[in-house]
Amino acid sequence: MYSKVVCKLEFTNVKCNMLDRKFGNFEQCYLKAQNRTYKYISIKALLYQKPVTQFKVNFALYKRSNGLQPISINTTIDGCKLLHKNGNTLALFLFGLFKTYSNINHSCPFDASIQSNRIIDGPSLICFLYTLQHDVRVEKLPTTFVMNHMTMFLPFPAGDYVFNTNWIANGAHRASVRVHATLD
């Protein structure tokens, strides 16, 4: 008879770095503890140069340990193909870690045109709507969701993990996001 192993995932840090400030900026990048059992990550990146006609993402998942690292995933995927559901299984798994809590859900090109048939008065209001519609967000990604997704197919050993993403847009490395977590 098998017994269910109860595991706990805890985010310990999140770091966002925009390498090209002309391309965009991180407006939000934080880890928040709502209470002792509910922690989440929120990230908001503003894009200044659009359209983004192609992008790649380098996903890396590392387990901290001395000596051999039993878990070390490092792959670069074409983001446009992934959004068309043509990505490989590993890429879909890694993207699934945050997809549900993200607005990264439409295909390339990622354009800045406002798709509205209403007439809007005032340039400040137009700029406000433009920013709201075309930033890239991961909002309130909870540890419970990531934990369920990570352990759905394979058991991960307890330890400290680093999930690193490097975002390459229009042929240049633009940003990196690094999440540190502990699995008990």
Image (cartoon, grey):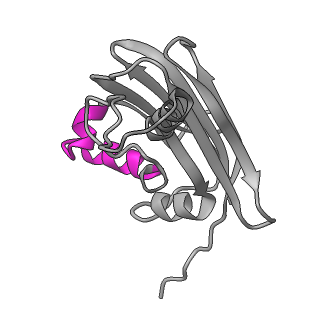
Q: Quadrant of residue 76?
A: top left
Residue 74 to residue 63: above or below: above
Horizontal side of 15 relative to 74 (left or right) equals right
**Residue at 48% over, 18% down:** 174
**Residue placed at 80% from the left, 65% from the top?**
35
* Picture residue at 40% right of the left edge, 52% below the top: 96
Does residue 34 sit above or below 74 in this rendering?
Answer: below
Figure quadrant of residue 106: top left
Farthest-out residue, bottom:
1
- Say whether residue 46 is magenta: no
Bounds of the magenta segment:
79-98
Inspect the magenta stretch and tell me whether residue 95 lies in it.
yes
**Considering depth in this image, is 144 or 104 the residue closer to the camera?**
104
Q: In this rendering, does residue 68 appear at all?
A: no
Q: Quadrant of the C terminus?
A: bottom right
Q: Position of residue 91 (x, y in %)?
A: 33, 42
How far from the left and from the top, in percent, is residue 132? 50, 40
Residue 34 pos. (x, y %): 76, 61
Q: Is residue 8 left or right of residue 20?
A: right
Q: Nearer the viewer, residue 77 or 183?
A: 77
* Residue at screen point 39% across, 29% down: 57
Is 181 in front, or is 71? 181
Q: Is residue 53 visible?
A: yes
Question: In this rendering, would 117 be left or right of 169?
Answer: left
